[in-house]
Image (cartoon, helix red, strand yellow):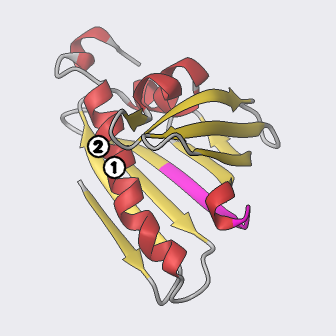
Amino acid sequence: MKSVADLKNGVVRAEIEIQATPMAVFEALTDPARLEAWWGSDNYYRTRDWISELWVGGKRRGTAIGADGKIATVRGEYRVIEIPTLLEFSWEASWDDFSTTVVRAEIRPTQIGSLLTIIHSGFSPDSISCQGYAPGWGAVLNWINKYFPPSALNIQQD
């Protein structure tokens, strides 16, 4: 797993190879029950109340409750959907005063399963927010990777 911020261009790029099919990864990124199951950890924050209207223009929204009890919201809408290889949606986070950025999730098949690449763009150059998203997306990719058991490929087929 790697996650880096390009502060000059206002882009975060994170990627991880997951032992699951592209379709399984796509569903984990779009199905509300699955999102709630894996996105977060007890010592950081847990997510809930996901809305995922899987069509271009459809809403995407989730609530996070921090280990400290603070509540945050992320909202947006789907811009591009190519099942099971590509998702793009706007990202408006309460902790960033709902400024709009764009998240692109690319899913490519690999010999062990899938390569998930997140490209989060639209930050102002040298943005402190951009810098903070690099470790954040790193945590998110580790959580989704832990969601899939090592035998996920043997169970789930495209």
Asked whether 35 falls inside the magenta stretch, the response is no
Query: Where's residue 133, x and y in %?
Result: 45, 64
In depth, the one of 21 and 125 nearer the eye is 125
Asked whether 103 falls inside the magenta stretch, the response is yes
Query: Where's residue 13, x and y in %?
Result: 40, 65
View extreme (front): residue: 68
Res 79 seen here = no
* Contact? badges 1 and 2 (CB < 8 Å): yes
> Would you name the residue on which mark 1 appears?
139
Image label count = 2
Q: Which label sits on residue 142? A: 2
What is the secondary structure assignment of the residue under circle 1?
Answer: helix
Position of 26 with respect to 122 (left or right) is left
Magenta stretch prevailing secondary structure: strand
Q: Quadrant of residue 135?
A: bottom left
Res 145 seen here = yes
Q: Is residue 37 above or below residue 104?
A: above
Disc 2 residue type (three-letter) = Asn
Crowd around label 1: few <14 · some 14–19 · many ≥20 (10 Å): some
The residue shown at (17%, 22%) is: 150
Q: Quadrant of residue 45?
A: top left
The residue shown at (63%, 51%) is: 88
What is the secondary structure assignment of the residue under circle 2?
Answer: helix
What is the quadrant of the C terminus in the image? Answer: top left
Q: Which label sits on residue 107? A: none
Disc 1 residue type (three-letter) = Ala
CA gap, disc 1 to disc 2? 5 Å
The residue shown at (33%, 49%) is: 139
Q: Which residues are magenta?
A: 97-105
Query: Where's residue 38, x and y in %?
Result: 40, 28
In depth, the one of 43 and 123 nearer the eye is 43
Query: Where's residue 105, x and y in %?
Result: 50, 49
